[in-house]
Amino acid sequence: METKRTFVCILTGLGICLVVALPAAAAGKAPFTVASVSPSTTPPAPIGLPAQGGGSLGSLTVEGASQVRIHFERPQLKLDLDPMAAPGLETESTLAIVERKRPDLMLPLLEDSALERAVRTPHPWVTGFAVGTLARLRQDVKGIAGWQLEIIDARGTVARRQAGEGTPPGEITWDGLGDDGSPAPCGLAYAPVLTARDKAGNTRRFVGASFSLPAYRVEAATGPCLLFSAEQWRADGGRGVSPLLVEAATVLNLHTDPDRPLVVTASAPTADEAESIGREVIEALAPLVGGGDKRLELDARVVPGAPAGGTVQVAPRVST
């Protein structure tokens, strides 16, 4: 009985070398329709392909062969592409590339200093300096036509004057500023004097209990202005690490230009006393403020009737 097997190959691609193993056919039954059979000393005959590439060879029938080898020629790949015209590869100058997005010169500094400890550490929780209302003056005078309230210091100088018609308010506050807007010095005793006038023109004066101003802070045109007496400073730590000066340095470092000089105004009954207290404050304050002692300037003033030991005011210098 003759043994015969048929294999059908569908070839649709290019660049493929296809080897098909077939069982041996009966003797004398080895027809070849498309290629030579291996083994053979002659090279296999090529199969023609469409001239334009692609296409299909249809079906291929091979009978009675032990092996069939089909060779295809690989066409040369040619890309009609200009790399310089591809999207994203446009040429431009180095300056134009850099100026697309200007570098952030501060970002490296911030990243480098993010974990560094600040040289001048702020202490916002320290509240040695009062802010706002420093004194509350209460009175209970009825049936008057007009009134005048004067706050007089121990030297007899009127620090603040207020007046009005009718009954005065039950409470009058004082922020430490004088009639001209200048801050009153610390360390002096102050007393309120109320002058009341009835409808007939008769007047009567009422003198309240004396009081003193705490260390306080006001906002001036040039920045924060801090006032304290030498007695308050020494009681708070003196030449050591004074919380009062630490808070003063914190306020100045946070709210003033680091290039603007700071003026330490020391007032005392004598020139030597004013110079001494001013130098001591500068020596203690210099390590705490940016710029050190080169930024601090002394303004020593002789003020008759100034409190014993002197009084101090620290504020940015007025530009000239």
Image (cartoon, grey):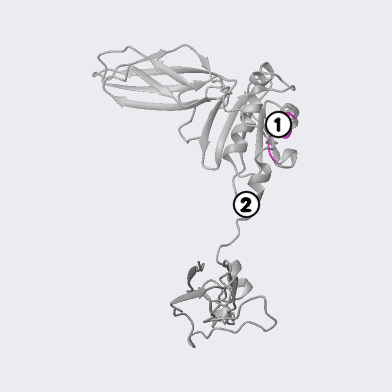
Residue reaching furthest to the bottom: 51
Q: For mark 2, does the 10 Å Cα neighbourhood hold few (<14), some (14 to 19), or many (20 or more) residues?
A: few
First-in-chain label (2 vs 1): 2
Q: Is residue 224 left or right of residue 55?
A: right
- Residue 259 visible in the picture: no
Indicate the amino acid at tag 1.
Answer: Leu
Assign a secondary structure to mark 2.
helix
Q: Is residue 132 left or right of residue 84?
A: left
The spot of residue 45 in percent (x, y) is 60, 84
The residue labelled by disc 1 is: 285
Asked if the residue under mark 1 is in contact with the one under mark 2, i.e. CB atoms within 8 Å, the reply is no
Label 2 to label 1: alpha-carbon separation: 30 Å
The spot of residue 294 in percent (x, y) is 74, 42
| Helix, strand or loop for the magenta stretch, by majority | helix
- Residue 186 visible in the picture: yes
Residue nearest the viewer, comparing 70 with 131: 70
Which residues make up the magenta segment? 284-290
Residue nearest the viewer, comparing 143 with 14: 14
Q: Judge whether 46 appears above or below 87 on screen.
A: below
Residue drawn at (51%, 74%) of the image: 62
Q: For mark 1, does the 10 Å Cα neighbourhood hold few (<14), some (14 to 19), or many (20 or more) residues?
A: many
Indicate the amino acid at tag 2.
Answer: Met
The residue labelled by disc 2 is: 106
Assign a secondary structure to mark 1.
helix
Q: Is residue 118 magenta?
A: no
The spot of residue 19 in percent (x, y) is 59, 70
The spot of residue 89 in percent (x, y) is 56, 73
